[in-house]
Amino acid sequence: MTPTRLGDMPDQNGDTGERTIPVSPTVHIEAFATHCTATWKAGSLAQCIETLQTSEYIEPTATVVVDDTTIAGREQQPVRDITPTETIRYLRVTPAASWTLSWEQRTWPVVSMSGTLSAGACRHMHLGTTECPGWPDTATATLKESISDV
């Protein structure tokens, strides 16, 4: 028997709750009863940190949880103090907003936003953490529709 991922389970209407936003790299949206999760292949950690440190959506004092292979356990630091190193494998920022953003080194870097997502913040973070040249209006409309279902 093949295990079923939560996003693959149809709801009462036959919808899996998962959508994709037609940008490059693709944004995958999973809608749950209480929140949404958006994930995409990301660029480098340095690119992600620069986006976090310069974003209007994240205050400079926001806490970042950092998993660095040279340190036992996870550390918490303000976003303004994070410096990219090759030994960081994971970070999660929790701004004052109702969502969190994580960067994780897997086979390739992955960014995940989870919570009550804002279309503007999601678009901004995707553009800042990837080489995506821009979002067409249809992609933004699809995102707004996807996250408003929650």
Image (cartoon, grey):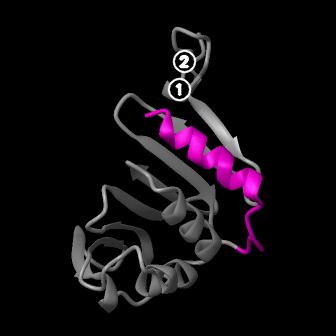
C-alpha distance separating marks 2 and 1: 7 Å
Give the answer, above or below, for where 12 lies relative to 98: above
Residue at 76%, 50% in the rendered image? 22
Closer to the camera in the image, 111 or 19: 19
What's the mark number on residue 9?
Answer: 2
| Three-letter amino acid code at the position of disc 2 | Met
Q: Position of residue 35 (x, y in %)?
A: 38, 39
Give the answer, above or below, for where 145 lies relative to 9: below
Magenta span of residues: 131-150
Residue at 59%, 22% in the rendered image? 16
Q: Position of residue 33 (x, y in %)?
A: 38, 28
Give the answer, above or below, for where 121 lies relative to 148: below
Q: Position of residue 68 (x, y in %)?
A: 35, 75
Image side of residue 131 versus residue 55, left or right? right
Taking the magenta stretch, the answer to whether it contains residue 139 is: yes
Residue at 67%, 44% in the rendered image? 142
What's the mark number on residue 5?
Answer: 1
